[in-house]
Image (cartoon, helix red, strand yellow):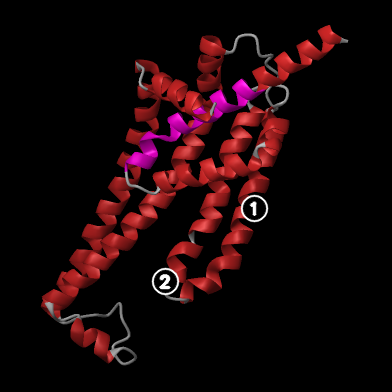
Amino acid sequence: MHNSTLVKASKDFFTGKFLFLSLAPFVVTVLILGAFFIYGSSEFLTLLQEGSASGDYSYIDESAYPTLTYFLGFTVFHWLIMTLFVLLGTFGVVLVSLVIAVITVGFLTPHIIDAVRKKNYLHVKKVNADGLLFSLWSILKIFMKFILLMLCVLPFLLLPFVNFFILQLPFFYLFYRLMMYDLISSGLCVDAEHIVKENRLYLFVVMAIFFFLSLIPLLGLLLQVFFVIYLSHFILNKSKSIEIVSNTNIKNS
C-alpha cells in the first residue's frame, strides 16, 4: 500500500498545478531570505576590510581581545571568517526557510487536499475545518512548545559534534506538528486524527525522512507540497479502507 501511495503522490506532484504550488513558496522564501543573507554577508565583509585597511576595530574591545585584533589584520583570516559565516549562515537560512515553507504551504494545504480528494477519494466524507481562532491558538501552542524545547537543547550546543544534531530536534518537532496539524485541521476526513495515532510510528519514520530531505538546500523548499500530497493520500486511503470495513460489517450484521 505504501508503494502505491508513493506512486500516486508522485504522479500528482508532477502535474502543472502542483508544480506551480511548489514553486511559489520556494521562490518567495529564497528571494526574501537570500536578499537578507547576501546583504548581511556583504556588510560583514566590508566591515572587516575597512578595519583591516585603517587598523580601526572599534567594534571590538582591543584590550580584551588583542590576539583576535591581530589576526583580523590578515586577509586570509578574513576569508576564513567569511567561509565559516557563509556555512553557518547557509545552515541557518535552510532551517528558517524550512519553517517558512511549512507555514506557507500550510495556507495551501486545503487546496492540495481538495485536489487529491477530487481525483481519488470523492467517497471519503469531508469534515469542517477548524475555526480561525482555534487554529491560531493551536499553532501558538505548538510554537510555545518549540521554544521550550529549543531552550532545553541550548546547553548542549556547547558540546562538539552533538551541537549540530541536537539543534535538529526542536525543528523536527515543529516540522512534524505543524504539518500534521495542517492536515487534520483542514477537514481531511472524520477519522484523520485516529489514523495518525494508529500509524504514528510509520508516520514518525516518514516525517523524519521528509525532514532530512528538507535540510538539503532548495530541495526541501520544493518538496513541501509533495509531502502534503503523500500524507493526504496515505490518510485518505486508510480512511477509505476503514469505511469499506465498516460498510461490510453493517451488511453482515
The Cα–Cα distance between marks 1 and 2, rounded to whole angstroms, is 27 Å
Q: Amino acid at mark 1?
A: Met
In the rendered structure, which disc, 1 or 2, sits on the residue that comes first in sequence?
1
Residue placed most toward the observer, 1 or 77: 1
Please tell me whether residue 195 is drawn above or below residue 126 in the rendered image. Answer: below
Q: Which mark is residue 144?
A: 1
Which residue is the extreme one toward the top? 251
Residue placed most toward the observer, 70 or 101: 101
What is the span of residues highlighted in magenta in the rendered image?
218-238
Confirm whether the magenta stretch covers residue 223: yes
Q: Quadrant of residue 66?
A: bottom left
Examine the structure image and report whether residue 158 is included in the region drawn in magenta: no
The location of residue 89, given as percent across then percent down, is 33, 59
- Which residue is found at the position 48% from the left and 28% from the top? 3
**Residue 150 horizontal/vertical position (percent):** 57, 61
Residue assigned mark 2: 161
User: Is residue 133 at least partly visible in the picture?
Assistant: no
Q: Residues within 10 Å of mark 1 (few under 14, many from 20)?
A: few
Which secondary structure, mark 1?
helix
Q: Main secondary structure of the magenta part?
A: helix
Crowdedness of circle 2 by 10 Å Cα count: few (<14), some, many (20+)?
A: few
Q: Nearer the viewer, mark 1 or mark 2?
A: 2
Residue drawn 64% across the image and 47% down it: 142
Q: Quadrant of residue 29?
A: top left
